Image (cartoon, rainbow, N blue to C red):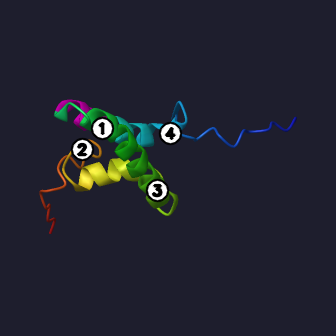
Amino acid sequence: MNEIDIPSYVDAQPQLFFYELDEAIVFVSCFGVGIWMGGWFSILSIFAGHMVVRVFKRFKNGALEGVLMHLCYSWGIMSLNERYQDAMKDDYYL
């Protein structure tokens, strides 16, 4: 059998320019809020979005993989999977 080299970036998240996908979602969200507010806020939101992404990168380096999805689940923004639909509802099994 021949040995096959497996690249180290196989499980890496997709890139959007120089951000990973979850960082790009944070940046685009900040930029979208700035556009929604209008005026100079759209320009300021670019800088604010970049700073928020820098803070998120620091947080993400010390956390588990896919931390943004788990944060969205715990805040009730989206479901985690088919079994756990709502984080705000407590399920007690006896």
Q: Nearer the viewer, mark 1 or mark 4?
A: 1
Q: Nearer the viewer, mark 2 or mark 3?
A: 3
Q: CA distance from mark 3 to mark 1?
A: 17 Å
Q: Nearer the viewer, residue 89 or 24?
A: 24
List the residue tagged with mark 3: 60
Q: Nearer the viewer, mark 4 or mark 2?
A: 4
Q: Earlier in the sequence, mark 2 or mark 1?
A: 1
Query: x and y percent of residue 7 in the render?
Result: 72, 39
List the residue tagged with mark 4: 20
Classify mark 3: helix, strand or loop.
helix
List the residue tagged with mark 2: 79
Please give the name of the residue rendered at 32% of the width and 40% of the height, measured from the top-left corner: 44
List the residue tagged with mark 1: 29
From which residue to which does the magenta span run? 30-36
Amino acid type, residue under disc 3 in the picture: Lys
Classify mark 2: helix, strand or loop.
loop
Please give the name of the residue rendered at 23% of the width and 50% of the height, measured from the top-left corner: 84
Q: CA distance from mark 1 to mark 4?
A: 14 Å
In the image, taking residue 16 as reference, residue 73 lies left or right, namely left
Classify mark 1: helix, strand or loop.
helix
Report the residue that reaches farthest toward the front. 40
The chief SS type of the magenta part is: helix
